[in-house]
Image: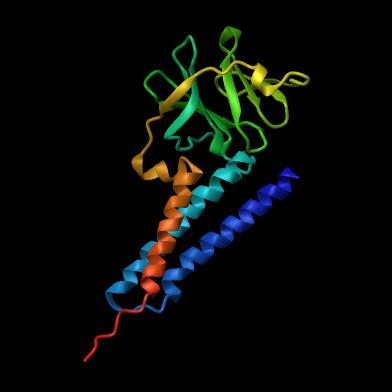
Amino acid sequence: MQIFAIFFIAAIGGLFMIAAASIPFTAKVKGWRRIFPFLGGFFLMVGSAGFFGSAFSAMGGLNWLPVFEWPVGYTGGVISTEDGLHVVPHTPSGRIQIYDANWEFRAGWHIDGGAGTFKVFNLPDGRIGAVPARGQWHYVFETDGRMLSKVSYSPNSYDSFPTEGQGMFVPTNPFLYIFSHPGISWAVAVSGMILMAFADRKPKSKTP
């Protein structure tokens, strides 16, 4: 089921991006107004990449990549370890990312949570506990991403686990904020659609 979802998201996202990339070359607009389909197509393509990319990552579609940092921006549930590390859960991409005291990226990995929300909390000996709301799995990780255990937390409930941490802005390149949350990505994609709709408007004819 998860493999099907990954392929479905990749197919739909790919079609959106291909369609967006082709718009500037098929638009029947002349003169200075050609800038609108180019900008609109670019915004739609980048916004689609962010929107579907987050879903693709949350389903585990990027697990084959080496260690990388996903743009986070603002997120909730950030905890700190006794060693001064910041443990950052990023629900939209389904990832846990580790930063040092100066917010330098150290490690990041996917958590199998069915593309849903999850909690992270401190455990003894510097380990990290994580529980997704979907699937009822209790994970234990090292701060480098190594998974130490994965057991079911049934019959306990998701709410029975501690809710630690707080909302924080993780230092992020402003140009990458578009990928930090599907809502931002979708807003950019909609902006592209508006620009293209504006380009298609026929100029008012001058009355003699």
Q: Residue furthest front?
A: 207
Q: Residue furthest right?
A: 155
In this rendering, the count of numbered labels is 0
Left of 187 or right of it: where is 155? right
Residue in view at x 50 percent, y 36 percent: 68
Residue in view at x 29 percent, y 77 percent: 31
Specify the color scheme. Answer: rainbow
Quarter of the N terminus within the rendering: top right
Picture coordinates of residue 153 (x, y %)? 74, 20
Picture coordinates of residue 145 (x, y %)? 58, 24
Left of 51 or right of it: where is 208? left
Residue in view at x 45 percent, y 35 percent: 72
Q: Image quarter for residue 205?
A: bottom left
Residue in view at x 61 percent, y 28 percent: 118
User: Is residue 18 shown above or below 71?
Assistant: below
Picture coordinates of residue 81 (x, y %)? 49, 13
User: Is residue 26 shown above or below 138?
Assistant: below
Quarter of the C terminus within the rendering: bottom left
Residue in front for this viewpoint, 191 or 80: 191
User: Is residue 191 shown above or below 66?
Assistant: below
Q: Residue furthest left?
A: 208
